[in-house]
Amino acid sequence: MLHQTRGIALHSTKFSETSSVVKIYTELFGLQSYLVKGVRKQNAKIKSGLFQPLTLLDLVVYHKEKSSLQNLKEADYSHPYQTIPFDIRKSSIALFLNELVYKTIHEEEPHPEFFSFFYSACLHLDAAGDNFSLFHLVFSLQLTRYLGCMPQLNYSEKTPFLNLREGIFQASAPEHRDFLDPTMSQLFFQLLQTPEGAGASIRVSAKTRDTLLEMILFYYHLHVPGFREMQSHHILHTVLG
């Protein structure tokens, strides 16, 4: 049966000399793998460039329940990016967002709220002005809400230490070393409360930004089962620095 749905491209792998399998997070069906026949041909009807990481798509797909590989009939740009492909800072952030979602979201079930959040974040990044150096930090923390491991929003002057293992702010440093000091805990809390696509009003040094990112990824390792080592954040340290 044919369905029309929006999607966000995540990953593409060669299937044969002329075909590819693409991972797409769709609005109707969640994360799905699609066989795209003929996409590697020179005169392909569906161009392989459509499946670059984080491309926003309008799709016509076949869907069979309990099938691990679906078929894609039509694909086109839902929103062609205006700035991301031409700004190395934005394109580096986009690669990071893509890798983070690819390594954390595995459910082949629809999740409309997450799709809306993810799709909207891509649009916000494309439309962002000059100050978007914290965009990936805000996205990473907002994503924890959909992964079911968002830290408690209980920061105060009386609870200034973030216990990374427990995901709570507490009155004193825990006995283990997996915590943030009051200064970093306050910044972490500010980012947790920052609306999607915002963050321009928070000023931090490049070194502090890099440290926060490392702590956020460490938090993922503690709370997201099977979370694998990230690669794209190393590029961010260089490009945004």
Image (cartoon, rainbow, N blue to C red):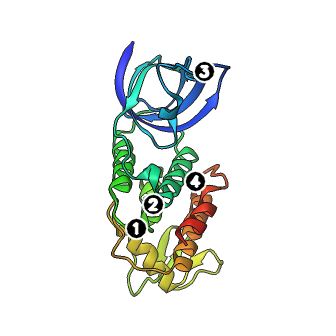
Q: Seen in the image, is 20 located left or right of residue 168? A: right
Q: Which residue is mark 3?
A: 19
Mark 4 lies on a secondary structure that is loop
Using a 10 Å C-alpha cutoff, classify the residue at mark 1 as few (fewer than 14 neighbours), some (14 to 19) or many (20 or more). many
Residue 150 shows which numbered tag?
A: 2
In this rendering, the answer to whether 108 lies above or below 36 is below
Q: CA distance from mark 4 to mark 1?
A: 17 Å
Q: Which residue is mark 4?
A: 224
Using a 10 Å C-alpha cutoff, classify the residue at mark 4 as few (fewer than 14 neighbours), some (14 to 19) or many (20 or more). some
Residue type indicated by callout 1: Leu
What residue do we see at 39% from left, 47% from top? 118
In the image, 116 versus 234, the foreground residue is: 234
Q: Position of residue 181 (x, y in %)?
A: 54, 84
Mark 2 lies on a secondary structure that is loop
Tell me which label, 2 or 3, sits earlier in the chain. 3
* Mark 2 vs 3: CB contact within 8 A: no
Q: CA distance from mark 4 to mark 3?
A: 33 Å
In this rendering, the answer to whether 17 lies above or below 111 is above
Residue type indicated by callout 3: Ser
Tell me which label, 4 or 3, sits earlier in the chain. 3
Q: CA distance from mark 2 to mark 3?
A: 39 Å
Residue type indicated by callout 4: Val
In this rendering, the answer to whether 49 lies above or below 214 is above
Q: CA distance from mark 1 to mark 2?
A: 9 Å
Residue 192 shows which numbered tag?
A: 1
Using a 10 Å C-alpha cutoff, classify the residue at mark 3 as few (fewer than 14 neighbours), some (14 to 19) or many (20 or more). some
Mark 4 vs mark 3, foreground winner is 3
What residue do we see at 51% from left, 34% from top? 49
Using a 10 Å C-alpha cutoff, classify the residue at mark 2 as few (fewer than 14 neighbours), some (14 to 19) or many (20 or more). some
Q: Position of residue 186 (x, y in %)?
A: 43, 80
